[in-house]
Amino acid sequence: MKKILFAVFVMVVANVNGQDPRFSQFHLMPQYLNPAMTGFFDGDVRFAAIFRDQWFTLGSPYGSTKFMTEGGEVDGRINVGKPAGEYDRKQDYIGVGVGVIRDAAGDEAFTSTDGYLALAYSKSFGYKVKHAISLGLQIEGMSEQFRNGGAVFPDGIVENIGKSNIKFDVNVGVTYHVDFMKRLNMYFGFAYDHVTSPTFNFLDVSSDRLYAKYVATGGAVIAIRDKINLVPAAMFLMQGPSLEVNVGANAQYIFGNEYDSKNTFSFGLMARFARPEGPEAIIPNVRLDVYHFTIGVAYDINVSNLSRGTNSVGAIEVGVVYIFKHRNRMVPTNASCPTW
């Protein structure tokens, strides 16, 4: 009986959390978004971290219900070849990176941890208009664990039942980036994750296949005035029966004299739509880029039917990025990579 009840619980959790974790500020975790974005930045080494706390006011007889996701990434780039000329900023590069994502859900502490190693190669071409095509490959190790923390079943007995699964998978991606000098900078990307679609089993009474995931993304920096840019972004994601669309834009104010200055302040709105829920969240967000640091904060305002059960509480998300750039290479030699 306990195994049956446990299996029912696992299947419910798997249906809710069997898909990959999501971030509202998806560009703050570029390797997780698309392995082809590994090394896609102006600098030598990039460090990124993010934390998301969802429905944090919910409670239960056993305490507060936790739905938290955190992650971290480190990637670097190795320039290949030399620029064609003094005013030609195009540069091929190899990107190498690692990252980890941890997701915890519910009182029963159903957790998933993904660690990944990524490799990308970017080929540049063009003179006045800079183009680049990048290909990325990612090896992923995934662990899903159920730790009940002393679940009480109908017979009144506290059980310490648990199960862990470890699987390996492969993700691939491609991006196209174009830089029209000082007026328009944009990219498009596509990623195919979970090529092997591994299966996770719990107590041999429940199994959950991780669906392949298809992610299409795009972003642009459009110069409106000398110090004001429009930064639209979009992400279309399909994983099994789930479909998610994130669209929105930010206004970006530049604190420097150049179009691609690293000193900017941005604010705007994103909207998330999901199948079968429909409109799911409105996401106001702010972002500060100062020198080589980025701090982003977003809050999901829940507008779906779930808002009645969550008291309209959504999710708070905070992300930080730092890019190290060697002083001897402060002059850019690659196609400009703006902060989306």
Image (cartoon, rainbow, N blue to C red):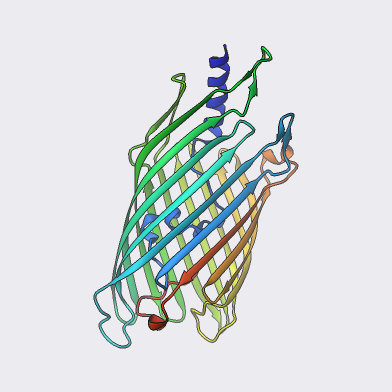
Q: Residue at x 35, y 54 (%)?
A: 118
Q: Note whether 244 is above or below 167 in the view shown.
A: below
Residue 123 percent across, percent down from the top left = 28, 68
Where 295 sits versus 150, above or below?
below
Residue drawn at (49%, 55%) of the image: 72
Q: Quadrant of residue 130?
A: bottom left
| The one of 241 and 325 positioned closer to us in this rendering | 325
Residue 332's spot in the image, x, y percent? 39, 80
Tell me how many marks there are: 0
Q: Nearer the viewer, residue 309 or 58?
A: 58
> Viewed as shown, does residue 286 lie left or right of 125?
right
Q: Is residue 236 visible?
A: yes
x and y, in percent, of residue 92 in the image = 28, 71
From the top left corner, tell me how far across and down residue 162 is, in percent.
52, 26
The image quadrant where one finds the N terminus is: top right
Image side of residue 267 versus residue 237, left or right? right
> Looking at the image, which is closer to me, 207 or 108?
108
| Quarter of the figure with residue 41 | bottom left
Q: Is residue 340 shown to the viewer in this render?
A: no
At x 39% / y 66%, what residue is drawn? 40
Residue 111 shown left or right of residue 197 in the figure = right
**Above or below: residue 52 compared with residue 297:** above
